[in-house]
Image: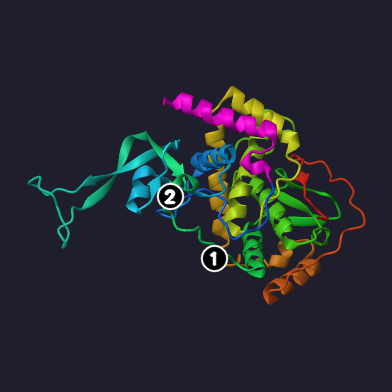
């Protein structure tokens, strides 16, 4: 399949799901011990960027609940078999590097102590596009039962999210409002108060979504569409990246996914994909960078020199939650009595799912 035909196929499927409200990043889901992002059943590695998104779309179209995928040859290699009559799903990937055999001055192969050929990595002059056909776990017989992945207890995943918030360097202010937003001009996030969320998971999902926008600041990943007016095509493109990144982060951290009020952006997303089908691959690639940037922050030590309380305007309230996190207890917060509208900002924000 030609590259343009492939992009058209993927974009058309996503447009249809956006119209039906079933696209992967517009569907809410709760924390689970099952993996959501597609992964290779043999290597255990997640599919990346556009391929991950496309396989989620294909699974939705065909009703697959299994997140495992593999090639025909890989299935055979683990004594499994693609069932008769099943058709695979085409994916494409870009190869920027290649492995070439090492040879000595006489042109003979260089081998290791066990007699195996040694290789070296070389950068290709031009990236090459390769195709592969993969099959879902539900199309294959002889597979072992899906194993539940190890999950962090609630307090531990919340503590990991706190580390991301602390290490982001982005100020976070809390107000009794029902909308969360990132201000490009101030490089700051405004959130509803923590007690407006019934449980911590949706709070952290919302906070990480807004920090996803913050990664586009020139001092970070420098995305050109950040800070553009609400309703513009570029605003829709930025929101598309943040929503897909939120899905990826939610799966990796096990905090669930709440897309908020995505309806305001669907029309813009459909228009963008109709005009340029490959935009979905660019968006997915940027979303992968956003997710990678944020999840890497949880591995870092606390930022030195600035107390965490100084980066959060609700230090006493945050301290209460942090104490509960450290004790491993689940917090049940009370709903706020009033929720005035959020103040206008360059980034209009999204409904935060408070009080659910």
Question: Viewer-proximal residue, 18 or 309?
Answer: 18
| Residue at point 92%, 57% (across, down) | 337
Question: Where 50 falls versus 319 (above or below)?
Answer: above
Q: Position of residue 241 (x, y in %)?
A: 61, 40
Q: Give the quadrant of the N terminus.
A: top left
Left or right: residue 297 versus residue 193 is left
| Residue at point 13%, 49% (across, down) | 109
Q: How many marks?
A: 2
Residue 349 found in image quarter: top right
| Residue at point 65%, 25% (across, down) | 271
Q: Position of residue 217 (x, y in %)?
A: 62, 44
Which residue in the structure is indicated by mark 1?
150
Instruction: Report if residue 18 lies within the magenta region.
Output: yes
Q: Nearer the viewer, mark 1 or mark 2?
A: 2
- What span is colored magenta in the figure? 1-27
Which residue in the structure is indicated by mark 2?
141
> Farthest residue toward the top?
275
Whichever of callouts 1 and 2 sits on the residue coming sooner in the sequence is 2
Question: Viewer-proximal residue, 51 or 65?
Answer: 65
Q: Position of residue 176 (x, y in %)?
A: 86, 55
Identify the secondary structure beneath mark 1: loop
> Farthest residue toward the bottom?
327
Badge 1 vs badge 2, beta-carbon distance below 8 Å: no
């Amino acid at each position: 399949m030609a590259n343009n035909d492939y992009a058209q196929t993927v974009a058309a499927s996503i447009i249809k799901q956006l119209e039906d409200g079933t696209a992967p990043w517009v569907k809410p889901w709760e924390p689970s011990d099952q993996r959501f992002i597609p992964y290779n059943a043999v290597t255990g590695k997640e599919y990346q960027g556009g391929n991950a998104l496309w396989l989620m779309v294909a699974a939705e179209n065909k009703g697959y609940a299994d997140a495992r995928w593999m090639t025909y040859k890989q299935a055979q290699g683990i004594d499994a078999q693609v069932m008769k009559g099943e058709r695979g799903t085409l994916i494409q990937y870009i190869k920027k590097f290649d492995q070439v055999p090492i040879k000595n001055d006489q042109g003979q192969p260089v081998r290791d102590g066990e007699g195996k050929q040694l290789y070296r990595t070389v950068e290709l002059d031009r990236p090459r596009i390769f195709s592969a056909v993969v099959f879902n776990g539900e199309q294959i017989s002889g597979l072992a039962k899906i194993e539940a992945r190890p999950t962090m207890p609630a307090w531990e995943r919340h503590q990991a999210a706190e580390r991301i918030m602390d290490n982001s360097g982005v100020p976070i202010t809390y107000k009794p409002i029902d909308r969360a937003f990132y201000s490009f001009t101030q490089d700051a996030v405004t959130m509803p108060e923590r007690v407006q969320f019934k449980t911590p998971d949706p709070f952290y999902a919302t906070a990480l979504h807004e920090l996803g926008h913050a990664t586009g600041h020139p001092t970070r990943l420098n995305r050109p569409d950040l800070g553009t007016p609400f309703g513009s095509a570029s605003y829709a493109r930025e929101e598309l990246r943040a929503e897909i990144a939120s899905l990826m982060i939610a799966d990796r951290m096990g905090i669930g996914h709440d897309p908020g009020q995505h309806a305001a952006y669907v029309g813009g997303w459909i228009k963008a994909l109709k005009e340029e089908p490959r935009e979905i691959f660019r968006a997915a690639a940027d979303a992968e960078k956003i997710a990678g940037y944020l999840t890497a922050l949880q591995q870092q030590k606390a930022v030195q020199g600035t107390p965490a309380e100084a980066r959060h305007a609700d230090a006493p309230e945050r301290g209460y939650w942090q104490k509960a996190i450290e004790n491993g207890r689940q917090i049940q917060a009370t709903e706020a009595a009033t929720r005035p509208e959020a103040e206008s900002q360059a980034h209009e924000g999204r409904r935060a799912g408070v009080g659910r």
